[in-house]
Image: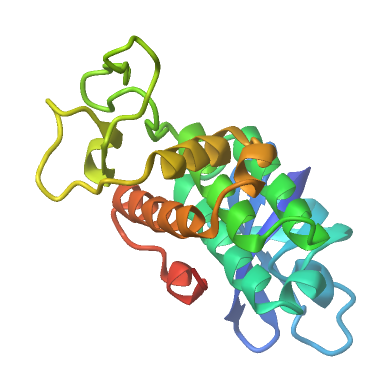
Amino acid sequence: MPLYRDEAIVLRTRKLGEADRIVTLLTRENGLVRAVAKGVRRTTSRWGSRLEPFTHVDLQLAEGRNLDTITQAETRGAYAAPLGADYDRYTAGTAMLETAERLVVEEREPARQQFSLLLGGLNAMAAGERLPGHVMDSYLLRALAIAGYAPAFVDCAHCGRPPVTATGELGHHRWFNPSMGGVLCSTCRIPGSATPAPETLTLLGGLLAGDWAVVEAADPRHVREASGLVAAFVQWQLERGLRSLAYVER
């Protein structure tokens, strides 16, 4: 069987037979890969801890007809312990892994941007220097943008009109609707649209851009409102809700 090497993040695992696991991986060069890790559930396995969710690994794999087989694994970054020690970080990190799997839909297609974004997000989450909700919401928005679902937080998502005030200054549109892709002007607004505070829209823009000065200066009430809008936008764009988001404290 042909062999190949790649760098990967373990997204999830499930049991196969008595001692094996099927491991779902987000790889740098081959996108989403599902592979068999033989014997990893045995207590004598050298690979067990290297192939757990949240682990960044270098792998050698053998190509298979349906599933590849992992033949070598070396740990490059182990994030399970720091994330598992904190409920908020663990649940937020789990939502990130689930999102990555949902967004990279084509197996064996390069997904370098999604891989790099997820790896950076896990690094930030494990470091503990930023709030878990901030890291997760920023990751979710940016991952959707890479996948082609960038939300509009300034210009109208429907007609593209900028939010110019009567004095000619740049302001904010008043309405937000996930089904329309973001903020809406007064002409394009539809029933059921939310009316977030201008500060909330500024915060959402900061999360999307990774502008941590803006994010960390936000008032808690605007953080809560922004998190709700991010969750609604993600759920709509993915069509099927993220199960892990239900466990995230907001």
Which residue is depicted at the point 65% across and 34% down? 112
Tell me: 82 left or right of 242: right
Q: In which quarter of the image is residue 153?
A: top left
Depth check, front residue: 83 or 224: 224
Residue 171 percent location from the top left of the image: 37, 24
Q: Residue furthest front?
A: 167
Taking 52 as reference, is 76 above or below it?
Answer: above
Q: How many labels does the image show?
A: 0
Relative to residue 111, is residue 59 depicted above or below? Answer: below
Q: In this view, does 17 lie to the left or right of 246?
A: right
Reply above or below: 150 against 5.
above
**In front of the other: 18 or 153:** 153
Residue 64 appears in view: no
Q: Residue at x 79, y 56 (%)?
A: 129
Residue at 39% of width from left, 58% of height from top? Answer: 228
What is the x, y in percent for residue 196? 33, 46
| Vertical side of 155 occupied by 45: above or below | below
How is the rendered protein coloured? rainbow
x 84%, y 90%: residue:
43
* Residue 241 percent coordinates (x, y): 34, 62
In the image, residue 218 lies at what x, y percent? 57, 48
- Decide if residue 164 is in sight here: yes
Q: Who is closer to the viewer here, 195 or 83? A: 195
